[in-house]
Image (spheres, rainbow, N blue to C red):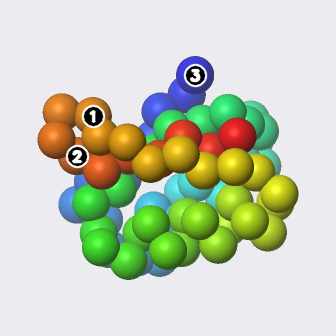
Amino acid sequence: MRRIDARGLSCPWPALRLARALRQQGTPLEILADDPAAEREIRALAAALGAPVTAFAIDGSPAFRVG
């Protein structure tokens, strides 16, 4: 599974990186994103694509699995 590390990036960059990866590769993908607004944007993007989102943590960082 491909993992995108978007830690340290402010929104909308985590969602933009996720959107690009989804266009190129499709699901499933994991994204690490520590901006508090990232979860809302990631969930909105996934909902628009009809893909499920699961939140979890990797090494204490917020992470999301899409698809």
Distance CA(mark 2)–CA(mark 3): 18 Å
> Mark 2: which secondary structure?
strand
Label 3, secondary structure: give it.
loop
Residue that carries the numbered disc 1 in the rendered image: 58
The residue tagged 2 is 61
Which circle's residue, 2 or 3, is located before the other in the chain? 3
Q: Where does residue 65 sit, x and y in percent of width and height?
A: 54, 41
Give the CA separation, mark 1 to mark 3. 14 Å
| Rendered location of residue 19, percent (x, y) | 66, 58
Give the quarter of the image for residue 34: bottom left
Q: Is residue 35 visible?
A: yes
Question: In this view, which residue lies farthest toward the left?
Answer: 60
33 with respect to 22 (left or right): left
For the N terminus, give its image quadrant. top right
Callout 2–callout 1 Cβ contact below 8 Å: yes
Answer whether residue 13 is visible to the viewer in this image.
no
Foreground label between 2 and 3? 2
Q: Which amino acid type is shown beneath numbered disc 2?
A: Ser
Say if mark 1 contacts mark 3, CB within 8 Å: no
Residue 26 image-quadrant placement: top right
Residue 4 placement, left or right of 2: left
Tell me, for residue 1, which label it has, or none: 3
Which of the two discs, 1 and 3, labels the residue nearer the N terminus? 3
List x then y, in percent, for residue 33: 35, 56
Above or below, 40 relative to 66? below
SS for dot 1 = strand
State the image coordinates of residue 20 (x, y, percent, origin top left): 66, 54
Amino acid type, label 3: Met
Three-letter amino acid code of the residue under disc 1: Ile
Q: Quadrant where the C terminus lies? A: top right
